[in-house]
Image (spheres, grey):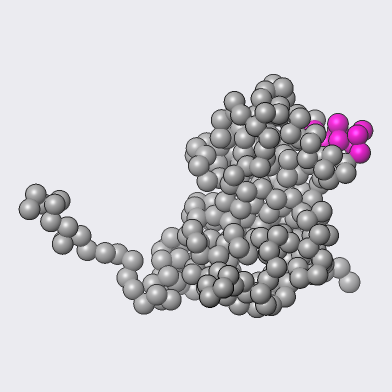
């Protein structure tokens, strides 16, 4: 029987000394879906991603990615997934095509097949005419598309994106997400971390994470309906207020310099 889940996580925990970065989280990601991790910086999103990618070993709990155990088969996981971070792991002194070729060779893509894939990815990322441009001269938006191409060069079944749109302009973000949805429609599973509500709104399933804890896993519509609110931002704020016991809205009455006092 074919497993419909690409990622399965149960009670996954990561501690760094006395600090718990990820606390006993459980979730599943269906094949071909877009799963969004929504939460502020420092909430545990990136640590979770690194455990699933085989970069960090969990302190406790278990999980599988593409059928491979995150505790015992991390090297196999690394070969089967595509990973892209907000830092865009590109070689600045190489051209667009040279970066794509470099990553293709790392993943062992054959020479003939690599040539075809580079052409396809240049088309996909709308990099036509920029093939021989030195990467460091590209804008943030173009680097973003190139980094995505490098993550896709070996045709991974799972694409992991760790805050991939941080620091890029709104137009580039919009184009990037159009590409992401196109990839999902082609059967590629997407795991993406974000703190942008408009991006999270377009995911099939959302995991709300805050202070290392997974608060809820559901679709956008389900989350809004369960909370009895009007939008995703209000839902997340409600979760945060419930777990902290504090109101997010603060009074500025005591800031005297605003009144010239």
| Residue situated in front as seen by the camera: 156 or 206 | 156
Q: Is residue 136 left or right of residue 169?
A: right
Position in image of residue 197 (x %, y %)? 48, 55
Q: Is residue 134 visible?
A: yes
- Above or below, 56 against 226 in this view is above
| Residue situated in front as seen by the camera: 192 or 68 | 68
Position in image of residue 157 (x %, y %)? 79, 54
Q: Quadrant of residue 127?
A: top right
Q: Is residue 203 visible?
A: no
The residue lying at 68 percent from left, 54 percent from top is 160
Q: Which residues are magenta?
A: 110-118
Is 141 covered by the magenta stretch? no
Q: Is residue 215 left or right of residue 5?
A: left
Q: Quadrant of residue 3?
A: bottom right
The residue lying at 52 percent from left, 39 percent from top is 168
| Residue situated in front as seen by the camera: 43 or 2 | 43
Q: Residue furthest front?
A: 17
The residue lying at 82 percent from left, 53 percent from top is 79
The residue lying at 66 percent from left, 57 percent from top is 191
**In which quadrant will I find the N terminus?**
bottom right
Position in image of residue 114 (x %, y %)? 86, 35
Q: Main secondary structure of the magenta part?
A: helix
Position in image of residue 85 (x %, y %)? 62, 48
Q: Residue furthest left?
A: 261
């Amino acid at each position: 029987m074919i497993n419909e889940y690409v990622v399965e996580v149960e009670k996954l925990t990561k501690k760094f000394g006395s600090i718990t970065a990820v606390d006993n989280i459980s979730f599943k990601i269906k094949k071909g879906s877009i799963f969004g991790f929504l939460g502020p910086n420092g909430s545990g999103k990136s640590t979770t991603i690194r455990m699933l990618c085989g970069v960090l070993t969990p302190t406790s709990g278990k999980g599988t990615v593409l059928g491979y155990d995150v505790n015992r088969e991390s090297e196999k996981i690394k070969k089967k997934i595509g990973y892209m971070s907000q830092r865009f792991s590109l070689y600045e002194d190489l051209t667009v095509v040279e970066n794509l070729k470099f990553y293709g060779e790392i993943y062992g893509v054959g020479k003939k097949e690599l040539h075809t894939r580079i052409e396809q990815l240049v088309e996909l990322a709308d990099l036509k005419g920029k093939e021989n441009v030195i990467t460091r001269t590209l804008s943030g938006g173009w680097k973003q598309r190139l980094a995505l191409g490098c993550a896709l060069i070996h045709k991974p079944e799972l694409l992991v994106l760790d805050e991939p749109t941080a620091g890029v302009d709104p137009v580039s973000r919009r184009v990037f997400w159009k590409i992401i949805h196109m990839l999902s429609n082609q059967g590629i599973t997407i795991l993406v971390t974000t703190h942008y509500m408009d991006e999270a709104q377009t995911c099939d399933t959302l995991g709300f994470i805050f202070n290392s804890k997974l608060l809820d896993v559901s679709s956008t519509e389900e989350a809004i309906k369960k909370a009895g609110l009007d939008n995703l931002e209000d839902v997340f704020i409600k979760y945060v207020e419930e777990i902290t016991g504090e109101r997010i809205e603060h009074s500025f009455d005591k800031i005297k310099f605003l009144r010239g006092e």
